[in-house]
Image: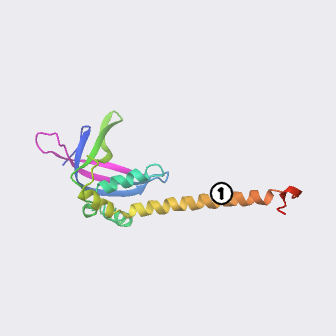
Amino acid sequence: MAYVEREGNFNVTKVLRSEVGSTEKGTGFIKLELEIEDPNAANIEVLTTWWTGWITEKTEERTADSLDFLGFCGDLDELIKRNETGSCIDLFNPAADVVAVVKGEEYNGKMYYKAQFINKRKEVASVDQAATVIAKSNLEGLLMKRKKSREEASFKASMTTANAKAATVEKAPLADEDVPF
């Protein structure tokens, strides 16, 4: 199989390999090698490309959506275990209407092409879509735990600040009109 060397929308036929890790700055990512086909080619041409899903506060929801579109039916721990062998084909079952949007980037004078987005061709409810919704990945659970942890930390910090302010606020003495009887 050859790597894609042009921009366009390509049908995703399967997920070949995976990498899970984090950058030097600590940003988590899930990188997948995809087998794709050009729906507009005269002859069916099977190509490969890479897609990277980032796990940050701003992108984690879109990454979870993309994994759902690809029919991710495992959990993040299993994907990490398989990171060493790269074998993850059985953890994904992309529906027929999943598209990789491939864009080119120039680097050191050479063009490199990779999938920037994973989308559904059309957003109509189907049996496959319902099955995907029912079989949500553990990544969603991981993302919810992470969000809840952040919210709890934020709540604790605000309570600490509120308690500190309450301790320093002096109460004015009651006036006659403040007494209810």
Q: Is residue 30 magenta?
A: no
Comparing 168 with 3, the one in front is: 168
- Residue 136: x, y in percent? 35, 62
Residue 175 in sight: no
Q: Does the magenta stretch include residue 38?
A: yes
* Residue drawn at point x = 36 percent, y = 50 percent: 52
* Residue drawn at point x = 16 percent, y = 39 percent: 40
Q: In this view, does 168 lie to the left or right of 144?
A: right
Residue at the limit of the structure toward the top, as seen here: 109
Q: Is residue 179 left or right of residue 42?
A: right
Q: In which quarter of the image is residue 149?
A: bottom right
Dot 1 falls on a residue whose secondary structure is helix
Q: Where are the magenta residues, as a range?
A: 32-54
What kind of residue is marked 1?
Ser
Q: In this view, does 33 lie to the left or right of 25?
A: left
Colour scheme of this structure image? Answer: rainbow
- Residue 107: x, y in percent? 36, 37
Q: Name the residue under label 1.
A: 158
Circle 1 residues within 10 Å: few <14, some 14–19, many ≥20: few
